[in-house]
Image: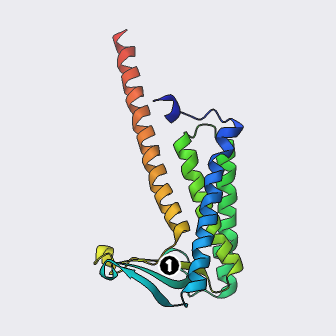
Amino acid sequence: MKKEDGPSAGSRKELFIPLIFSAAVIILDQLTKQLVVANIPAWSVGAEFFGGAFRIIHVYNPGAAFSLGSGLSRSLRGIVFGLLPVAVLAVILRVYFRNREFTRLQRWCIAGIIGGGAGNLIDRFFRPEGVVDFLDVRVYGFLGFERWPTFNLADSAIVVCGIVIICSFIRQFLAEAKENRNAGKTDKTE
């Protein structure tokens, strides 16, 4: 592994600089949501692109991803989608600061996930209607969806950073397994 890809030394700078990305995700997420709320009436389409394949719309999601749990009572939604995510973010932050083995890429991905989670939590606590979603994409029947469930920048940060960090962990695991196999071969030849 190259030095910049290897385990982080855990210096203060290496720990805190990625959190600027968290703040940027939160700020951009909230700004874009505010633009949508201010300029597009709720439950309507604001703009269409590429023959309707991509739309900017204004909807609220009182549930979780794919509107799961949107039928729950408001108080139960507050517990499940408000307090539980706060606890999850607290655990992620604790792991982020305590684990010195994350690579720089993994730290930046975790920071993106933290920013996305916090961005949606702000909506959950300050928008009684639910999380503002506005990116609407036609997927032409992929996974049974004509249109992908509407999402926002916070959701995008969580998904993209989640995919990248999973790929990073897999790559790291495979590299370590290869090193262990190679070390085992040299031990047998000695």
Q: Give the vertical position of 5 relative to 29 (above or below).
A: above
Which element type, helix, strand or loop, lies under badge 1? strand
Camera-nearest residue between 152 and 32: 32
Q: Residue at x 28, y 78 (%)?
A: 141
Q: Is residue 70 visible?
A: no
Q: Residue at x 43, y 83 (%)?
A: 47
Seen as rendered, the residue at the extreme top is 190
Name which residue type carries label 1. Phe
Q: Label 1: which residue? A: 134
Q: Residue at x 39, y 21 (%)?
A: 184
Q: Give the vertical position of 156 relative to 170 (above or below).
A: below
- Counting from the top left corner in percent of width and height, residue 1 is at 45, 30
- Counting from the top left corner in percent of width and height, residue 128 is at 67, 85
- Counting from the top left corner in percent of width and height, residue 41 is at 55, 91
Q: Quadrant of residue 100?
A: top right
- Counting from the top left corner in percent of width and height, residue 130 is at 61, 82
Q: With 113 as the anchor, is 175 left or right in this view?
A: left
Q: With 87 as the anchor, is 21 left or right in this view?
A: left
Q: Residues within 10 Å of mark 1 (few under 14, many from 20)?
A: many
Q: With 39 as the anchor, is 98 left or right in this view?
A: right
Q: With 50 as the anchor, is 100 left or right in this view?
A: right
Q: Residue at x 56, y 85 (%)?
A: 39
Q: Is residue 83 visible?
A: yes
Camera-nearest residue between 30 and 6: 30
The quadrant the C terminus occupies is top left
The colour style of the image is rainbow
Q: Give the vertical position of 74 relative to 121 (above or below).
A: below
Q: Give the vertical position of 56 relative to 5 (above or below).
A: below
- Report how many numbered discs are placed on residues in the image: 1
